[in-house]
Image (cartoon, grey):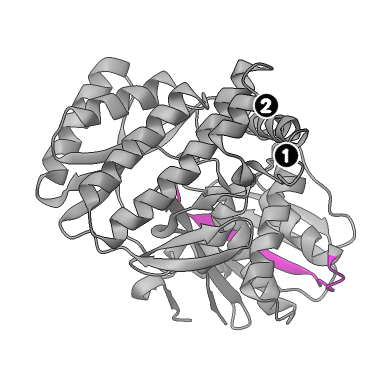
């Protein structure tokens, strides 16, 4: 069976033994986020884009009620039935089972199947490897069940799987970008209305380079949920005086100064970052429209400072990478990306010098930390694809 996926790329050879004539193949990419970090679950704006690293699912029908899941990367499998699905403790199968459970919750009949998964989205790098898996599974199941769900519902199903089975109360950005990604475009997403506009991403002589710290601190998931509750507490205090406020999207710095500053300095800082980041994103989109990449890059640096100092989701390794990047004039923007406490920085580097500068930053990082630095050059590609 000859099938090709993103931009004519062949299906990963490791999946070929699991393919049958009736198999459904789905691919869904990881994502970068140019600017707008930790704003999605506060009803704010984000600017993600799908990248050329994907999760792949081969789903093959069965004639019983069993579900057999395989993770090729781990050389592991898990088996259950359509009637006995439940969350597992710290298990890769949750990303697939959560999607099945979300279909069932919508009264969509799911019959037995085998699903084999492989992914080249680096895990723990802040590139939304879990969302890529969830969205690929949602796409494959949508086709298998003939449920004809629109793309936005597959996004919501994938997000629900992350909440209920993976236990991370993520916003909608990751899954949205994985499904709606468009080649050479970023997605300006309003996380309140779920309306989006495609922003052409003609970088004209600049390259997006990701530096992966090779670390993932255990704080990431628990602190992510803590930040959500801190933001919500700030909103509750603002609502006491401004009852029309629904989320931090509606809050101004003046409101924070009046209602939060004297009550809790930490919660004030968390909320202040989000308010400022929404403003930064809207300005950054204007700069992109004007092809003013230098000022766009300055906003990226500002975002990192806010994430590190106010939102406190950075770490010494991420801060060191951004500090090193700032030393090079060819790097016009850099910041940590994703949930935080490890993962990647995203960097906007002059194309002609990108390779040389990347090597210099890699050497400096490894000398200072004794950690290996992975370097990813990414291109902006399409989102979820299904092949029958």
Residue 161 in the image: x percent, y percent? 72, 53
Write down the quadrant of residue 264 in the picture: top right
Relative placement, left or right, of 304 versus 131 is: left
Nearest the viewer among 168 and 37 is 37
| Depicted 365 relative to depicted 72: above or below | above
Instruction: Compare marks 1 and 2 and give the one earlier in the sequence.
Output: 1
Write down the quadrant of residue 205 in the picture: bottom left
Residue 159 in the image: x percent, y percent? 67, 54
- Whether residue 220 is visible to the viewer of this picture, yes or no, is no
Residue 119 lies in magenta, yes or no?
yes
Nearest the viewer among 135 and 333 is 333
Which element carries disc 2, helix, strand or loop? Answer: helix
Relative placement, left or right, of 366 versus 116 is: left
Residue drawn at (65%, 16%) of the image: 262
Residue drawn at (47%, 40%) of the image: 277
- Whether residue 174 is visible to the viewer of this picture, yes or no, is yes
- Residue underneath mark 1: 242
**Marks 1 and 2, how far apart at CA:** 9 Å
Which element carries disc 1, helix, strand or loop? Answer: loop
Q: Are marks 1 and 2 in contact (CB under 8 Å)?
A: yes
- Residue underneath mark 2: 259
| Depicted 193 relative to depicted 378: above or below | below
Residue 17 in the image: x percent, y percent? 53, 68
Residue 381 lies in magenta, yes or no?
no
Determine crowd level at label 2: few under 14, some 14-19, many 20+ residues with C-alpha closer than 10 A.
many
Q: Which residues are magenta?
A: 106-121
Write down the quadrant of residue 210 in the picture: top left
């Amino acid at each position: 069976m000859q099938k090709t996926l993103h931009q004519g790329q062949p299906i990963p050879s490791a999946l070929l033994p699991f393919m049958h004539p009736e198999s459904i193949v789905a691919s869904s990419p990881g994502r970068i986020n140019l600017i707008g970090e930790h704003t999605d679950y506060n009803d704010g704006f984000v600017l993600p884009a799908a990248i050329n690293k994907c999760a792949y699912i081969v789903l093959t029908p069965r004639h019983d009620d069993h579900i057999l899941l395989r993770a090729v990367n781990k050389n592991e499998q898990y088996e259950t039935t359509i009637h006995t699905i439940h969350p597992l403790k710290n298990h890769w199968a949750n990303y697939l089972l959560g999607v099945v459970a979300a279909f069932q919750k919508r009264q969509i009949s799911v019959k037995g199947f085998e699903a084999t998964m492989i992914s080249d989205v680096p895990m723990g790098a802040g590139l939304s490897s879990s969302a890529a898996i969830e969205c690929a599974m949602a796409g494959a199941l949508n086709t298998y069940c003939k449920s004809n769900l629109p793309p936005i519902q597959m996004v919501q199903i994938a997000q629900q799987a992350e909440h209920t089975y993976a236990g991370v109360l993520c916003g909608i950005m990751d899954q949205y970008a994985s499904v709606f990604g468009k080649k050479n475009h970023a997605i300006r997403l309003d996380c309140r209305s779920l309306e989006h506009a495609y922003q052409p991403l003609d970088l004209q002589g600049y390259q997006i380079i990701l530096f992966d710290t090779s670390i993932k601190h255990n704080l990431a998931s628990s602190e992510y949920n803590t930040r959500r509750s801190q933001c919500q507490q700030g909103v509750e205090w603002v609502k006491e005086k401004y009852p029309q406020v629904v989320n931090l999207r509606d809050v101004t710095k003046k409101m924070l100064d009046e209602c939060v500053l004297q009550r809790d300095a930490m919660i004030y800082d968390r909320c202040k970052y989000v308010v400022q980041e929404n403003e930064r994103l809207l300005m950054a989109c204007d700069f992109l429209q004007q092809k003013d990449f230098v000022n766009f890059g300055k906003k990226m640096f500002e975002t990192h400072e806010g994430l590190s100092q106010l939102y406190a989701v950075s770490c010494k390794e991420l801060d060191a990478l951004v500090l090193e990047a700032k030393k090079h004039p060819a790097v016009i923007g850099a910041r940590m990306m994703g949930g935080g406490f490890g993962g990647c920085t995203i960097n906007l580097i002059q194309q002609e010098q990108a390779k040389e500068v990347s090597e210099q930053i890699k050497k400096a990082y490894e000398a200072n930390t004794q950690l290996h630095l992975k370097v990813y050059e990414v291109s902006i590609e399409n989102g979820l694809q299904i092949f029958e």
